[in-house]
Image: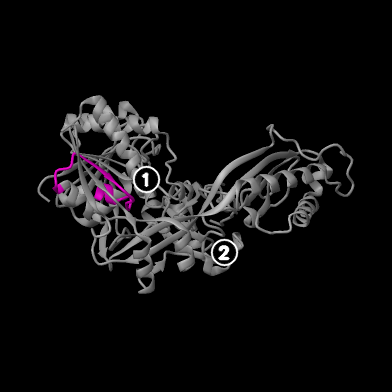
């Protein structure tokens, strides 16, 4: 069952990419939060990053949302860029499975 | 706060095209201040580096004219923040030039406050030596070399320069680089609003109707700030604000949903409450302003060379199975011919890992792939030369098991090689400690139609 309403990524400043997962059902959100699947460690593994490159990882109850912010490998728009706005980096999150 | 204040954001990015129906409805709601954010780092460092906007002059002129005419009808000041895309002097003057044209054509009489946000590099260097410049997040420390190569530095102003301009009776403020939320927080603070609510209101309004459902940066949003809350209402009847849509906006383009840093403060949204007033208006309360030592965000860009690219496609399955061999061979041949390694040559393979590169969890090519051959070199001529050679090598390289011996790549364009011009990279993205909230931001008053 698909449980997230929004799964997206975007730059949060030119040196970071932030990942948002937003739910619309408070009970499902609560179960996802309790399941412990979305953590800095799981984001690091999913994005093949050392743990310290995951800069923020939080649940934000008012929006029924999970957010993680990762360090970019290159700054936005620099010669080695592949995604200047950082808007197409959320796809790995779509495959996450949560037992609820 | 004695009286509520109605603040209109016409859209999230000046020059995207204000919807006139939404603006007409907004004017009927009698906003007392009309503003729009005009800047962002999103599109990349070239705007700041080159001193150019990335919206069209024609649509920007149209948007400013609509705002000025609405402001005149309502007797409301008009505020443009981070003018021209990056808010450096060239961007501010580009905007001023448009305003002058409109005033002349429309016979407008305007007292315009023009606020600069450029920081002389010598001042940044002094602050750096005094240990007052720190990286902002995962950014390398600033060096003298990087600063010297930077084309110019801007600082993000807070509310104080705006307050001074509003106090001086400006009809229009053209402000250089600003903390986006300051554009709308300033009039709210001036009206006596709680700073936590004012900054939170600003963070939402600077994106236009992005916080609505459906959200859009290209539409109007009216915010009414009161003593203990603010109320949001999209003026386009096709949109509505819901507690979830507004709360969700706290996530957008920010490192953290519950905390955001601005000049001299942190905005704490961990206790924020979002309540529906009806089916399209939301009241927000509980946003907390936590004072911090004063520091300004600095931005600067430096040239990284000149770019020439080729876009191609590969459909032959044998060629696709030999992509790594092919690109390694082209890299090798190019290195051999051009002894001096003053260029960067890369291949971005769409249909395999073009978007996510080393983060791609499924780097498996499809039945066809797109190839971006990308060269960045110290001059445009050098980039052209290296690109042409690498392209010809890619086109005719004999990979293992080749059957399609005539050509390896399909080019959708003729000529195949495309000049992209100068390339920039962010070289300054740091916090600079400061004493005065206004010292870096000179205000000049200019009269039009006097």
- Res. B131 image quadrant: bottom left
- Res. B113 image quadrant: top left
Could you tell me which secondary element the residue under label 2 belongs to? Answer: helix
Please give the residue where the numbered disc 2 appears in the rendered image: A44
Q: Who's the residue at 26% across and 25% down the image?
A: B105
B66 with respect to A7 (left or right):
left
Task: Estimate the x, y position of residue A21 in percent, counting from the top left.
Answer: 48, 52
Kindly identify which chain the residue marked by label 1 belongs to.
B
Residue B400 in view of the camera: yes
Quadrant containing the C terminus of chain B is: top left
Kindly identify which chain the residue marked by label 2 belongs to.
A
Task: Estimate the x, y position of residue B432 in percent, counting from the top left.
Answer: 35, 65
The magenta stretch is: B167-185
Please give the residue where the numbered disc 1 appears in the rendered image: B90
Could you tell me which secondary element the residue under label 1 belongs to? Answer: helix
Above or below — where is B18 with respect to A78? above
How packed mark 2 is, by other alpha carbons closer than 10 Å (few <14, some 14-19, many 20 or more), is some
As for residue A9 lying within the magenta part, the answer is: no
* Viewer-nearest residue: B64 or B245: B64
* Viewer-nearest residue: B106 or A24: B106
* Viewer-nearest residue: B360 or B15: B15
Query: Which color scheme does this rendered protein use?
Result: one colour
């Amino acid at each position: 069952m698909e449980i997230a309403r929004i799964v997206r990524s975007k730059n949060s400043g030119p040196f970071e990419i932030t990942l948002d997962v937003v739910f619309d059902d408070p009970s499902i959100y609560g179960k996802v939060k309790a399941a412990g699947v979305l953590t800095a460690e799981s984001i690091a593994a999913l994005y093949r990053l050392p743990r310290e490159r995951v800069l923020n990882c939080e649940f934000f109850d008012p929006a029924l949302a999970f957010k993680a912010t990762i360090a970019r490998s290159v700054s936005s728009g620099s010669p080695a860029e592949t995604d200047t706005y950082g808007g197409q980096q959320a796809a790995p999150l779509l495959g996450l499975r949560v037992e609820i | 706060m004695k009286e509520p204040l109605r603040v209109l954001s016409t859209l999230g990015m000046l020059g995207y095209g204000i919807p006139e129906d939404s603006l007409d409805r907004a004017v009927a709601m009698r906003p007392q201040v009309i503003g729009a954010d005009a800047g962002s780092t999103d599109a990349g460092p070239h705007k700041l580096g080159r001193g150019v906007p990335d919206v069209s002059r024609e649509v920007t002129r149209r948007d400013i004219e609509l705002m000025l005419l609405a402001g005149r009808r309502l007797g409301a000041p008009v505020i443009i923040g981070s003018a021209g895309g990056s808010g450096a002097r060239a961007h501010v003057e580009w905007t001023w030039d448009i305003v002058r044209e409109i005033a002349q054509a429309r016979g407008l009489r305007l007292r315009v406050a023009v606020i600069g946000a450029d920081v002389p590099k010598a001042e940044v260097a002094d602050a750096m030596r005094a240990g007052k410049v720190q990286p902002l997040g995962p950014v390398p420390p600033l060096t003298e070399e990087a600063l010297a190569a930077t084309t110019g530095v801007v600082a993000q102003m807070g509310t104080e320069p705006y307050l001074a301009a509003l106090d001086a009776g400006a009809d229009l403020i053209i402000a250089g680089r600003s903390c986006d939320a300051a554009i709308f927080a300033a009039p709210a603070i001036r009206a006596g609003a709680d700073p936590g609510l004012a900054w939170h209101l600003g963070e939402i309004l600077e994106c236009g109707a992005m916080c609505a459902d459906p959200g859009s940066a290209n539409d109007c949003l009216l915010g009414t700030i009161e003593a203990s809350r603010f109320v949001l209402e999209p003026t386009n009847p096709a949109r509505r604000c819901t507690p979830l849509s507004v709360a969700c906006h706290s996530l957008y383009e920010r490192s953290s949903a519950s905390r955001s840093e601005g000049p001299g403060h942190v905005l704490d949204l961990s206790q924020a409450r979002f309540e529906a007033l009806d089916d399209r208006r939301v009241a927000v309360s509980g946003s907390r302003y936590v004072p911090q030592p004063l520091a300004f965000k600095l931005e600067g860009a430096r040239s990284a060379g000149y770019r020439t690219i080729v876009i191609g496609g590969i459909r032959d399955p044998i060629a696709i199975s030999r992509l790594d061999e092919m690109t390694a061979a082209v890299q090798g041949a190019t290195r051999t011919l051009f002894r001096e390694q003053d260029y960067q040559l890369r291949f971005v393979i769409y249909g395999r890992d073009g978007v996510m590169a080393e983060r791609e969890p499924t780097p498996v090519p499809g039945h066809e792939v797109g190839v971006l051959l990308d060269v960045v070199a110290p001059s445009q001529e050098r980039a052209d030369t290296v690109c042409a050679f690498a392209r010809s090598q890619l086109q005719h390289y004999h990979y293992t098991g080749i059957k399609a011996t005539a050509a390896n790549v399909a080019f959708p364009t003729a000529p195949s090689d495309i000049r992209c011009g100068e390339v920039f990279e962010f070289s300054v993205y740091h916090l600079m400690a400061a004493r005065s909230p206004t010292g870096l931001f000179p205000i000049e008053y200019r009269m039009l139609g006097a």
